Image: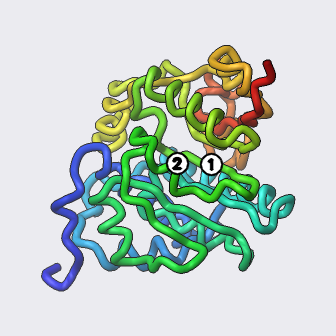
Amino acid sequence: MADKLSLEKIKGVPQTLLIPLRGRYLETKRKGGIISDPKAVEIIDAIEHDFAENDLPWDSQIMISTRTEIFDQAANKFLEKNPNGVIVNLGSGLDARGHRVDNGSMLWYDLDLDECIELRKKFFKETDRIRFISKSVLDFSWMDMIEKNRPVLFIAEGLLHYLEESDVKDLMVELQSNFPNSEFVFEIYSPMITGSWHRHPHIRNAFSMFKWGLNTGKTLEKWSKGIRFLTEWHYLDRHPKRWRWMRFARAIPSFRKVMKAVHLQFTPILN
């Protein structure tokens, strides 16, 4: 492994970027998979990390693949309506969505912590339309770097549950204030997800760092008059045969809504 890229600088929450990366890799390798992400295969083959022991469990692989499908579709739908629109990928990790959905005229920002953007630059190149921002999502100065004269979609896949609820609220209020006609698609789990919820050590470790959960995105309308709930997509509603026994538990509403992506609209607050 001497010729492979070391990940020694990637620790704590940033290290969880390996989980979705591995999920996309495994699904791409699967015949007839839900998604195809050749970039994930390229990256996994180039980094120094032993996935052989305690590799990603089947349910996490399907969850990651399903949410990737949902977020790709949401980004594509936004760009169909707004071909010259702006998409801001919060907590981008090593996600290649900007390249998968690139329509040739969009403006895309990948935002993450310094060490994650440093790693990202090993595999992705900035262009005039795909740009990197090395900042914490909670350092709101990054908002000054986003072009504001086009429609904007913010996406946060696998990020917000690592933040305190008060920080998530502050983030959404700032987004609404600075981008009052934008949209936000983000992943969130129900509060029932905890560090002891999963048997797999890597997934259990990630869950142990979760600080916030949500039963339904509808409740976020209470945070601000400028937040409007549009819809949410529940992962268990898709590809039921792949979910094995878990598909039968969809009949329990609380279980069906455990894993989801929420779509919000930010609107101006009228006096």
x 66%, y 61%: residue: 34
Badge 2 element: helix
The percent position of residue 69, horizontal first and vertical second, equals 67, 56
> Can the viewer see residue 253 in this picture?
no
Look at the image and tell me in which quarter the N terminus lies: bottom left
x 69%, y 28%: residue: 250
Locate residue 227: give its quadrant. Answer: top right
Badge 1 element: strand
x 56%, y 33%: residue: 174
The percent position of residue 183, horizontal first and vertical second, equals 71, 43
Between 101 and 248, the one nearer to me in the picture: 101
> Can you name the residue that lies furthest to the front here?
271
Look at the image and tell me in which quarter the C terminus lies: top right
Count residues near mark 2 (Cα–Cα under 10 Å), then give few for <14, some for 14-19, many for 20+. Answer: some
The percent position of residue 269, horizontal first and vertical second, equals 75, 25
Residue 143 bears which disc, if any? 2
Count residues near mark 1 (Cα–Cα under 10 Å), then give few for <14, some for 14-19, many for 20+. Answer: many
Q: Earlier in the sequence, mark 1 or mark 2?
A: 2
Q: What amino acid type is highlighted by mark number 1? A: Phe
Quick check: 252 left or right of 62?
A: right
> Can the viewer see residue 97 in this picture?
yes
The percent position of residue 175, horizontal first and vertical second, equals 60, 38
> Can you name the residue that lies furthest to the left here?
2
x 48%, y 36%: residue: 160
Location of mark 1 (residue): 154
> Can you name the residue that lies furthest to the bottom here?
3
